[in-house]
Image: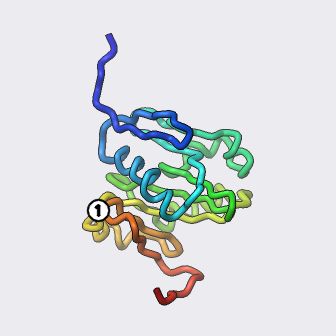
Amino acid sequence: MERRLKKVKLKLPKGAIVRLSPDKHNALQVAVVKEFGPRFAPGARLLFLGNTTKKHVICATDQLAALSIGIAEYEKLPDVVLYAPEKNRLFLIEAVTSHGPVNPQRRDELESMLATCPAHRIYVTALIERADFGDYLDDIAWETEVWFADNPDHMVHFNGRRLPEPY
């Protein structure tokens, strides 16, 4: 008899429902898709979503291949990958609950892996709470972003080519 365990539910844009194992990591990934995506990557497609019990819950192989991301790279992808075709932006998002943020080594590894990908890459470290930020501050790579699920309208920008602008 199949057990009816409590799962984290994610409804996808076309109506399909994905059920993830019930833990903080998957809850954060759902927040990334539901909250981060519409705010900072409007119209983006969910190409990849990992899970703590199943490695690849969502893996859009055809769309990843069109971006020159091969099957061999799937194990190395971050937790969530969104692609905004209008601006040709690939959002590579690490949902951090136990493992670390996008640090310089991880950013370099992904840059090498995605060297032939034609999309502009945006690296994001997603945290559950802003209070967790201090735990990872020294490890976060420059030219990346940090997003907090408990304060979804804002991000912290770690330098890069863009200059500050007035609001």
Q: Secondary structure at mark 1?
A: loop
Residue 133 found in image quarter: bottom left
**Residue 46 position (above or below residue 107):** above
Where does residue 32 sit, x and y in percent of width and height? 43, 54
The location of residue 11, given as percent across then percent down, is: 45, 39
* Residue marked by disc 1: 129
Locate the N terminus by quadrant. Answer: top left
Horizontal side of residue 13 vs 19, given as left or right: right
Where 26 sits versus 86, above or below? above
Q: Position of residue 15 (x, y in %)?
A: 51, 36
Tell me what residue is drawn at x 50 percent, y 87 percent.
164
Q: Relative to 15, say whether 42 is above or below.
A: below
Give the residue at the far bottom of this rendering.
Answer: 166
Neighbours of disc 1 within 10 Å: few (<14), some (14-19), many (20+)? some
In the rendered view, tell whether residue 109 sits above or below residue 70: below
Image quadrant where residue 44 sits = bottom right
Side of 59 where 142 appears, left or right: left
Residue placed at 69% from the left, 61% from the top?
Answer: 86
Q: Is residue 100 left or right of residue 84?
A: left
* Amino acid at the residue labelled 1: Glu
Q: Residue at x 48, y 42 (%)?
A: 50
Q: How is the image coloured?
A: rainbow
Residue 24, percent from left and from top: 30, 47
**Which residue is found at the position 64% from the left and 62% from the top?**
89
Identify which residue, 122 or 167, lies in the foreground: 167
